[in-house]
Amino acid sequence: MVRPRVSAGGGMAALRYSLKKAREAGGFLKLWKRLRSKNACKTCALGMGGQKGGMVNEKGHFPEVCKKSIQAQAGDMQAPISEDYFRRTPITAMARLDSHGFEHLGRLAFPIVAEPGATHFRRASWEEAYAKTAEALKAAPPHEAFFYASGRASNEAAFLWQLVARAYGSPNVHNCSFYCHQASGVALNEVYGSGTASIVLEDLDRADLAFVIGANPASNHPRLMTKLVQLRRRGGVVIVVNPLKELGLVRFRVPSDVRSMLFGSTISDLYLQPRVGSDIALLKALLKGVLERNALDQRFLEERTSGWDAVRADVEATRWETLLEACGLARAEVDRCVELLCRAKAGIGLWAMGLTHHQHGVDNVLALANLWLARGWLGVEGAGLLPIRGHSNVQGVGSVGVAPTVKAAFAKRLEELYQITVPSEPGQDTFASMVAAQAGKIRVALCLGGNLYASNPDLKWAREALQKVPFSFSLTTKLNEGHVHGRGQTAFVVPVLARDEEAQPTTQESMFNYVRLSDGGKPAVAGEMRSEVEIVAELASRVLPKGRFDWQRLKSHTALREEIAKVVPGYEAIATIERTKAEFQIPGRTMHGKEFATKDGKAHFAVTPVPDTSLAPDEFRMMTLRSEGQFNTVVYDVEDLYRGNDRRDVVMMCAADAERLGLREGQRVLVASELAAMQVSVALVDIAPRSLAMYYPEANAIVPGALDARSKTPAFKNIRVKLRPVGAAR
Ligand SMILES: Nc1nc2c(c(=O)[nH]1)N[C@H]1C(S)=C(S)[C@@H](COP(=O)(O)OP(=O)(O)OC[C@H]3O[C@@H](n4cnc5c(=O)[nH]c(N)nc54)[C@H](O)[C@@H]3O)O[C@H]1N2
Ligand SMILES: Nc1nc2c(c(=O)[nH]1)N[C@H]1C(S)=C(S)[C@@H](COP(=O)(O)OP(=O)(O)OC[C@H]3O[C@@H](n4cnc5c(=O)[nH]c(N)nc54)[C@H](O)[C@@H]3O)O[C@H]1N2
Ligand SMILES: [Mo]
């Protein structure tokens, strides 16, 4: 195998790339200034930036460099799309653009609209956009509208979004979390009564074991890599569980660390490669090993947990052979892992989409939590569970109520303060809104950022569903495929300011439950872009009856923070953050005290059955994943440096499987799921047998819409497929 071209993740390749982007953005200094401004980073939810300045973490460490933030920043600094472009370019031509093509059109700088039967988008005035949207909302029954939000919006905009939706009467409020970490939230609520991380950033400095399962932080959360390198330097161990050997999780060069940059840092002490979708079997095998070695934290089990007996009985009754066969690992590998787990004093379990994107997503997380509880690694310093969140403010968006159900205390405050009725039955989740749209039961679709269309399984179905919606209204910084393929019959798309362009400060919440303040700044390019809050408040003032709300006041972020402080438990300190600049840890979530947030104060074990992982002889299990050069549906660069792919229409597989099928590197094949087939090239990588990987979002063309029943999250990483060479008979 010749690929990949580099020997470690990070390093010079990342730095060279950053300089190239700086040139595109109109100069290094200009980009540097934006990167260093006091705003929370726009990419992942690690929570860089804020009042300590850009590229600084919650503990004040600088510099924390990441390619992704540079891509996102440079992207927002692109020149605006001209009016002439829309006049010249029919929608049919725009529809041929790929994600990369849309991203490179530039910033959207004025509202646009496509009316029924129109051949082109045309420029619209803000007045027209507001008036027509208000008219559509007033004409629709509220439960036939949905309010989607991506995880980039500020707490202020997101809080207002759900308030307006609920005041209008629609419970269909949801965010990208349903396609992301929802399974983590559901599982963690069952385990300890709160849906977010049990640790704070400092705990990562105290742990002596990190267990990274189903995540690729080398590409998706590069700043976490510093923590892993430091943990190993202190004598701790890092275990990685991933069907695919991710180069950056084997070796990484941390750009801000001279020693690591020069010599490269080993990341994983042990790298286990179970088959795609078989983590429960592995996690149970590890628990069985811990049990057999008697490495349980007995006191913790007795005093602070419930449900252990049932889990113990279940694990004892499951045979080693069954578990090993399901995950495809050798007993010796599992034993080595058990040994490391038993030797460590304080472990942190970290995971992302590799665990949640399955029909058994909630069970995956519960199985990990069982292992952690058995070792006593919850609610104590230096140990715990950390779902590695996606979007930069996806956690805050959920905290401030952009969800179809809110906790009772939250609902009560909304009712008391604003005399609105929060229905006790939940509204639609994201997928349910898509199903309703397909059934012709959605009249108005409103999207606060994101790319709902391309994020969905079964793209053809998703396109049909969204195109049946009579009216859509999207707020965005740039155009994406969703604005064309996933547009309603009348579709308004309006331009917003990014958080570091806002005139008023905004706040964000990190994956460590830490709330940060972003100063805002000046727009990177000239245009009619408006603040998200201003747009939502203006729209609300035209739709909702006069008198109940002071929409003028609610255009002020300061006022919105005062409201958030009154409604959201734990968010009280947000009311004064602008004045005091005191960023804060949300109390009641990390549970370093005696009790957990469950009704009985205990942490709960749960029995997790091993899902059927069998495959027909000619079948594979395929996962969809992100490359180094993309942020979700936005593809910045086609090349995936770390996996050695210079194109995206590939299926990654191991050499042994390829040989068995008589396939070679670069050969064109059809990958067929029960839904559809896609033509791609074979790319040989180090991946578990019978496991395949393809790139998201393109592969959504063949991802069927099967969901995890409890989290309503599509099984984006567990698709049964067959392969055949192009041209071969069926
Ligand atoms: N550069 C960049 N950064 C990002 C994003 C981005 O697109 N680009 N997206 C942001 C968002 S919204 C999110 S949610 C996160 C996503 O962050 P991640 O979850 O890290 O991203 P993915 O690429 O979806 O998949 C992660 C890993 O899961 C592994 N995996 C897949 N299936 C399985 C399985 O069955 N078991 C196990 N053990 N592993 C499996 C894959 O091999 C892959 O290495 O990143 C955030 N940060
Ligand atoms: N097959 C498959 N499908 C998946 C996944 C997978 O791994 N595999 N991952 C899932 C996951 S984890 C997620 S989170 C979803 C992604 O779901 P989304 O959040 O809906 O999608 P993104 O691609 O992140 O949205 C990017 C768009 O947001 C807009 N945007 C960017 N910045 C701003 C801003 O500041 N304000 C506003 N208003 N708009 C902005 C731009 O239009 C940009 O194109 O996809 C899911 N779908
Ligand atoms: Mo995500």
Image (spheres, rainbow, N blue to C red):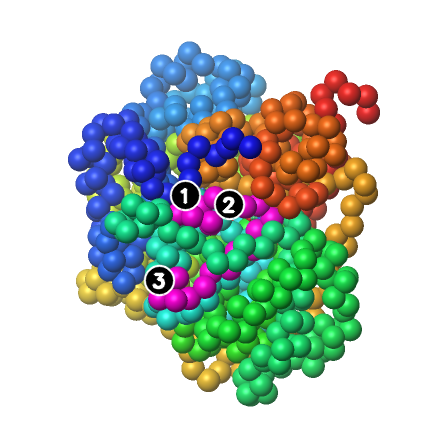
Q: Does the residue labelled 2 lie within 8 Å of ligand 1?
A: yes
Q: Is residue 328 left or right of residue 453?
A: right
What is the magenta range? Answer: 231-252
**Mark 3 vs mark 2, CA separation in Å:** 21 Å
The reply to whether discs 1 and 2 touch (Cβ–Cβ < 8 Å) is yes
Q: In this view, does 699 lie to the left or right of 562?
A: right
Indicate whether residue 113 is drawn in magenta.
no
Q: Is residue 401 visible?
A: no
Question: Which element is circle 2 on?
Answer: loop
The quadrant the N terminus occupies is top right
| Badge nearest the viewer, 3 or 1 | 3
Q: Is mark 1 within 8 Å of ligand 1?
A: no
* Residue 88, image quadrant: top left
Question: Which element is circle 3 on?
Answer: helix
**Mark 3 vs mark 1, CA separation in Å:** 18 Å
| Badge nearest the viewer, 3 or 2 | 3
- Note whether 597 is above or below 155 in the view shown: below
Crowd tier of the residue under label 2, counting other residues whose Cα lies within 10 Å: few below 14, some 14–19, many 20 or above: many
Crowd tier of the residue under label 3, counting other residues whose Cα lies within 10 Å: few below 14, some 14–19, many 20 or above: few
Mark number for residue 354? none
Q: Name the residue under label 1.
A: 9
In the rendered image, residue 148, in percent from the top left (x then y), is placed at 51, 46
Residue at image point 43% right, 82% down: 593
* Residue 620, image quadrant: top right
**Mark 1 vs mark 2, CA separation in Å:** 9 Å
Q: Mark 2 points at which residue?
A: 246
Q: What residue type is labelled 2?
A: Glu
Q: What residue type is labelled 1?
A: Gly
Q: Name the residue under label 3.
A: 233
